Image (cartoon, rainbow, N blue to C red):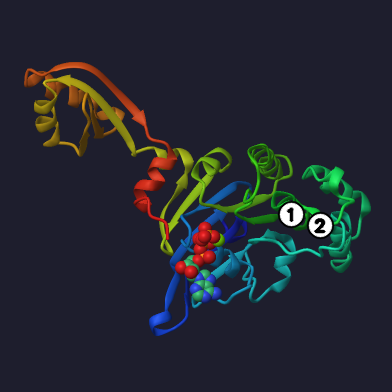
Amino acid sequence: MTANSMAIELEGLSKVFGRRKRRVQAVNNISLKVERGQVFGFLGPNGAGKTTTIRMLLTLIFPTQGQVRVLGQSPYVARDVLKRVGAVVETPVFYNYLTGRQNLEVLARTSGTNQPARIEALLKQVNLGERAGQRVATYSLGMRQRLALAAALIEDPDLVIFDEPTNGMDPAGIQEMRGFIRELVDVQGKTVFLSSHLLSEVEQVCDRVAIIHRGELKREGSVAELLDGSSRVRIEAAPLDRAQVILGEGWKLTPYEDHLLLEAKRADVPAIVRRLNETGIDVFHVAAERSSLEDYFLSVTQGETV
Ligand SMILES: Nc1ncnc2c1ncn2[C@@H]1O[C@H](COP(=O)(O)OP(=O)(O)OP(=O)(O)O)[C@@H](O)[C@H]1O
Ligand SMILES: [Mg+2]
């Protein structure tokens, strides 16, 4: 892969806020490559460093250390590259006394690309059509979020960066947003980089995922890859206490009243059954379960939130 096929490259990226007692290492030595033409999820609990990383990508704050490349170029050197990037970072700010449509018109004019038909299409795409003529002051958080999306897309960017895109949206809105994000990638050929602390959501829309925790990159891979190697095997056997002792020699397990849950893969099942048979334990049920990415995420981050 050449550097140009990458939408985003982070190399040893770090950000430290404050000094001495106030020192916070928000991002710690993150290296990451995001190829073009996919939806990439940047996952982590509150305070993990997602927004800080995104702000560095957009040159809104300066890295303490490390390199950022966007669409093959450093946005700090080649500022023009950011014209090909659309972004929604945290709660977007609009002119409250203007309508949604007028806000987009103002943005389009400042960027020199005022095309009324495009604005109407965008308003429709994000499902704001009906309310576009009302003042933003009357909008709900979810509606502001939709308007922000339309705003991010005004210059038809190659790369779209969303910080918590479904923040404030209702379930129907979240569902719509998923379809919308997939369309940007699958139909329009863009790259989407989005952050979220909601795993279930990311699992459904992303091709690849990076998990960050306390500023550090914990894992990176396709959703399927991350699910692999984190499976569990449920076992019902008698006597269960003896099965627990025997299997405990070879596997990490959690005992429950009527079954054991082993940290093992499907491929381990024959060995597990053999071990139980050898020792005269009766096996009633063995089932390999795939733990959801959510469980996986919790195990990586130990379920912590800040
Ligand atoms: N301007 C700042 N000054 C000092 N500390 C900051 C600043 N911005 C962020 N931090 C700290 O950096 C850490 C990472 O914050 P960041 O906003 O990047 O997290 P996040 O992953 O986006 O979390 P959330 O899911 O809550 O949005 C936090 O501990 C936060 O308190
Ligand atoms: Mg954030």
Q: Is residue 188 visible?
A: yes
As drawn, 177 above or below 23: above
Quadrant where the C terminus lies? bottom left
Quadrant where the N terminus lies? bottom right
Q: Residue furthest front?
A: 138
Which residue is denoted by mark 2 in the rendering?
136
Element at label 2: helix
Q: Is residue 50 visible?
A: no
Which residue is denoted by mark 1 in the rendering?
144
Task: Please indicate whether residue 102 sits to the left or right of residue 247 in the image.
Answer: right
Q: Residue furthest right?
A: 116
Q: Residue at x 85, y 60 (%)?
A: 103
Q: Residue furthest left?
A: 279
Q: Amino acid at mark 1?
A: Arg
Task: Please indicate whether residue 16 sits to the left or right of residue 105 in the image.
Answer: left
Residue 102, percent from left and from top: 89, 59
As drawn, 150 above or below 129: below
- Is disc 2 in contact with disc 1, using a CB cutoff of under 8 Å? yes
Residue 68, percent from left and from top: 56, 69
